[in-house]
Image (cartoon, rainbow, N blue to C red):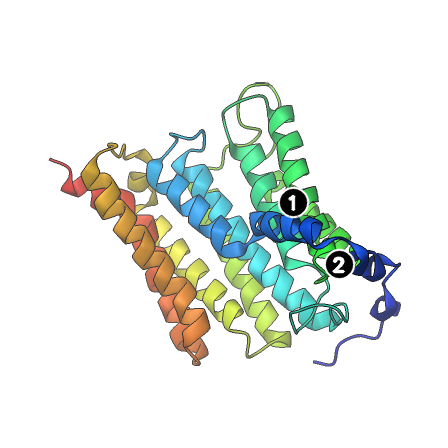
Amino acid sequence: MTPIATPLVTRGIGEVALAESLPEAVTAVFWALTHLGNPYLLLASVALAYLLGDRIGLSRRAAVFALALGLCAIGLTTGLKHFFGLPRPPISYRDGLGFPSGHALGATMFWGGVAVLATRGRWRQRLAVAGVVVATVALSRVVIGVHYLADVVAGVGIGVGFLAVAVGLGPGFDRDDPHGALTTPDHRHVTALFAVAAGLGLAGLLVAPGESELFLGVGTAAGGAAAWHRFGRRAATVTVALSRRTFAVGGSGLALALGVMSGSAKLLASGPVIAAAGAVGAVGLLALPLVVDAREP
């Protein structure tokens, strides 16, 4: 598909010159802060929260809902980037397309999702913290020169809009308890969001048929939907003990599942094989609480 013509090709408003003029020390700080939106870091974080199950204020069902949100972000970001076909700033160390910012979009959906799903602290405080993190990630992408301001603004806006629709049409918002979660997804909401993520990935492949991340997202979403439908209710209620065995078995399982998913996208060339690896990794990840519980004496 031919990218659409748009005035956004010349979307800079002076931020590139500003980024070039900043001291190296400032740029180095933002290089570190930009990892708050790294998709693999976010995936690892939500996978750990899923294994621990409500010990950090995020239920296992909420954690897997956040995982599905992240997979939706992959399809949205990659599909939209190829649809618009807009380059990164000339000072960017990365090649490829820049609009919208994947870090800004993904961070908005992940951190915003955690804020509405978590159960610790007041929801207004959680949303405020999430807003600060998202703004930091968005600013960092401009400071290190890999995005224009328009890219990150669009990423945040799309992320907020999608999150509002995903929650509003799914579990819905509930502000009655100022200390609790704004929303509590049930079993079918998680399955449905996995299906949406798979659909967005397939739609993205129409405009970017060779993108390995899209194949990974589709496979992971499909595997996640199948696994959650099959044993999600049991996995959501298992209490995993904090023991050496849990950290040994659970940690090894997490590393293996995440390694299979991330490694396949980087090392394999066949789209269907990447999708299959993503599905296997998703099934293994969602099964971890059951595996750990079965090994407990």
| Mark 1 secondary-structure assignment | helix
CA gap, disc 2 to disc 1?
21 Å
Image position of 24 with respect to 54: above or below: below
Residue 204 place in picture, x, y as percent = 60, 69
Three-letter code, disc 1 = Val
Is residue 171 among what the camera can see? no
State the image quarter where residue 150 is shown: bottom right
State the residue at coordinates (29%, 47%): 251
State the residue at coordinates (54%, 63%): 199
| Sequence-earlier tag: 2 or 1 | 2
Residue 192 place in picture, x, y as percent = 49, 50
Three-letter code, disc 2 = Asp
Q: Which mark is residue 165?
A: 1
Q: Residues within 10 Å of mark 1 (few under 14, many from 20)?
A: few
State the residue at coordinates (73%, 68%): 88
Image position of 31 with respect to 179: above or below: below
Report the quarter where the C terminus lies.
Answer: top left
Tell which tag, 2 or 1, sits nearer the viewer: 2
Task: Judge by depth and name the residue closer to the eye, 119 or 264.
Answer: 264
Residue 219 place in picture, x, y as percent = 43, 65
Residue 50 place in picture, x, y as percent = 38, 41
Does 138 sit left or right of 193 as displayed? right
State the residue at coordinates (43%, 61%): 220
What residue does disc 2 label? 151
Is residue 251 among what the camera can see? yes
